[in-house]
Image: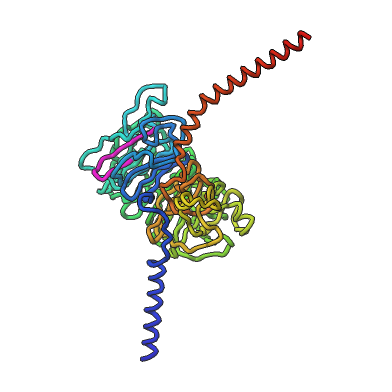
Amino acid sequence: MNKKLICLVITILFSLELYSIKYYAKDYSCVEEEFVVSYYAGEANFSIYLDNYNNLYSVGSNASGQLGRGFSDQSKKIEPLTTKVLSDVSLVSTGRSGFVIAYTNDSTLYGWGINQYGQTGHKTKNSTDPTDNIISIPSVIHLDDNIKIKDIKSGERHTLLLDINGNVYAFGNNNLGQLGLGLETSRKTIVSEPTKIDELFFNYEKIVQIETSEYTSYCLTESGDLYTFGDNSDGTLGDSSEDYQKIVNVPTFTDIRNVEKISAKSTTCLYLTADNKAFVFGSNIFNQFGNLEFTGLKSSVPVEIKDLQDLEGVKSNDKIIDILAGGISNFLLTDKNDIYSFGSGGSNELGFDIFNAESVFNTPGITSPKLGIPTKINFYEPLSIKEITEKKLTEYIGKTPAILSHKIDVKIDKFINSSGSRTFIRDINGNVWSFGNNEDGQVASGNIATIVCPIISTLYRDDNYDKEIKQKNYLIGPIIGISLIFGTGLAFIIYAEIKRYSNK
């Protein structure tokens, strides 16, 4: 009796311990409510953020008007809070060619950015000047009132919409069949408003998830069957075909079944099966297959991702429960709430300094700047960039806002999104962390420093960079004027000296 009681007590204590680890892990929040990032979408050269109040902000390149600030030019914006682009946003997606599609809580669909191929959901103008097909402010896309959108995914020049009834709509360019509408595959084939894909192609099954890579589209049915359509030049159709010139212009079953989740970006697609096995197909140029046994540069035959390790090379048998494709860099989440990365890491896209990992940790699988084995990302105690700035903590100014000598245990609950260049994730306490290439401050670190580990994302900036850029522009005129005066004066002095010398 006593033994049974002791066993029961031990079991209860063990369960409580697990519960406390999962739900009472230390909260490292260091960002004030008004600066919290709740969602991210972006491409290599621009980023879109949502705050906790569903307001949309933008930073980065604005050459195609993709920042939605009412103009387009070659300048770059670093300060997000100077312009609120849109309010009450529930969904947002970005396209690599430089456009944004957003959906608000009142069921209004918006598009802006480059519209050369109807990718913003608006009619194109017949003009040879690309700037004539730029929409620089959020503009309403026509959508029937009875259509309620559940998800949005955008490729290079096209977008898929998924409604609450499991129907899929497509618009944009169909040059490689990526719209799945059975239309001619030509650069001139443009669909400028959301058009429903015939459910016949899906055997009348409801679609539960959509994804897009550059020129390929993916639809997952309720029963776990994967359909793909579009381009196969990198094996992105995943249909085990060796014909890399193939173009498929209607949704076609891949023979991939029992799928729980898909994730695609750039020229790579990952999927997770119901028995927690992860597979990948498409491009492997940056070792983004996470499997060193596969040495090819691409494959339309799915390759299983098997091995996990930490930075010291210690293997892990953790179960994979989620996937995230960044394209050039990809990510796995395990049942221990740890995150693993693999692929390209030359600008810290993997969540750590790959060159340091190669030299200090001697991490297996690295052929700089690529990592071919999924490797656990370490976390370090974050610092408030606002506090660093206001208190003028000089030892941290211009650096990653974290104490790199203090490793901490952070449990990740959810992937948010990845552009490959940068990635955003959420921990079990609701804090959003980010890492990657911090060009124009797009990692949301609060500064424009090189970021060598995950930091807690913030909309705060340690300087008014946009104002600084304008000031630099304003100084160009005076500098030129001063240079002309100085040059004229110098020429006069030289001329006088020559004349004086000749008169001797």
Magenta stretch in the rendered image: 102-113
Residue 364's image quarter?
bottom right
Residue 344 visible in the current orientation: no
Residue 123 pos. (x, y %): 32, 28
Q: Quadrant of the C terminus?
A: top right
Residue at the extreme bottom of the image, as rendered? 1
What coloring was used for the rendering?
rainbow
Q: Number of marks in the image?
A: 0
Front-lying residue, 211 or 254: 211
Front-lying residue, 42 or 383: 383
Residue 54 pos. (x, y %): 31, 47
Residue at the extreme top of the image, as rendered? 503
Q: Residue at x 49, y 57 (%)?
A: 340
Q: Position of 333 compared to 205: left or right?
A: right
Task: Say whether residue 105 is magenta.
Answer: yes
Q: Position of 450 compared to 135: left or right?
A: right
Residue 444 pos. (x, y %): 45, 47
Residue 23's image quarter?
bottom left
Front-lying residue, 187 or 343: 343
Q: Most prominent secondary structure in the magenta stretch?
A: strand
Q: Residue at x 76, y 12 (%)?
A: 501
Q: Residue at x 52, y 25 (%)?
A: 478
Task: Say whether residue 348 is magenta.
Answer: no
Q: Quadrant of the N terminus?
A: bottom left
Q: Residue at x 51, y 59 (%)?
A: 380
Front-lying residue, 477 or 80: 477
